[in-house]
Image (cartoon, rainbow, N blue to C red):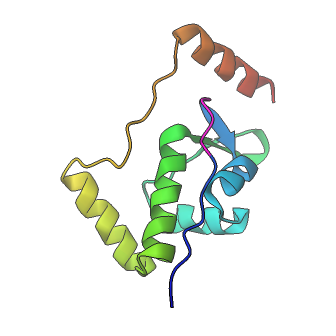
Amino acid sequence: MSAVREELPVIPAKRYFTIGEVSELCGVKPHVLRYWEQEFTQLKPVKRRGNRRYYQHHEVLLVRRIRELLYQEGFTISGARNRLDESSARGETREPVAAPSSLREEIAEIIELLRV
């Protein structure tokens, strides 16, 4: 049985993503993302008013890595957690995390988030 690799969309250059956006970018349903937050301590989205979750770019990459470990590589939750812990202990990263292009843009995004 051959595994078909689903192409995921490009992650836009922005600082924060809603759970719906992360769901679409990673091909995982929102309830699965909420469950993974409980299982993977590295996954800690910022929570704002009404408990709304806002994921940062590095967390979107982490969700994609968790998805890859579980769905493509066949790890269990426990095995994926251990693999992520081993990788972070060795200082490995899968992709570089893009920094905001300017402090002004970052401040504007934070102000917009506070208005929500």
Q: Position of residue 15 (x, y in %)?
A: 59, 30
| Residue 11 magenta-highlighted | yes
Q: How many marks?
A: 0
Residue that lies at the very extreme toward the bottom in this rendered image? 1
Answer left or right for 51 relative to 62: right
Q: Position of residue 20 (x, y in %)?
A: 75, 52
Q: Which segment is the magenta one?
A: 10-14
Quarter of the image containing the C terminus? top right
Q: Nearer the viewer, residue 51 or 79?
A: 79
Q: Does 47 sit above or below residue 100?
A: below
Q: Position of residue 29 (x, y in %)?
A: 71, 66
Residue that lies at the very extreme toward the left in this rendered image? 90
Q: Residue at x 80, y 24 (%)?
A: 115
Q: Residue at x 60, y 41 (%)?
A: 11
| Residue 44 magenta-highlighted | no
Answer left or right for 97 relative to 113: left
Answer left or right for 21 relative to 62: right
Q: Residue at x 46, y 24 (%)?
A: 99
Q: Quadrant of residue 7?
A: bottom right
Instruction: From the image, give the main secondary structure of the stretch colored magenta.
Output: loop
Q: Position of residue 48 (x, y in %)?
A: 70, 38
Q: Residue at x 51, y 66 (%)?
A: 67
Q: Does 55 sit above or below residue 13?
A: below
Answer left or right for 20 relative to 41: right
Q: Nearer the viewer, residue 13 or 16?
A: 13
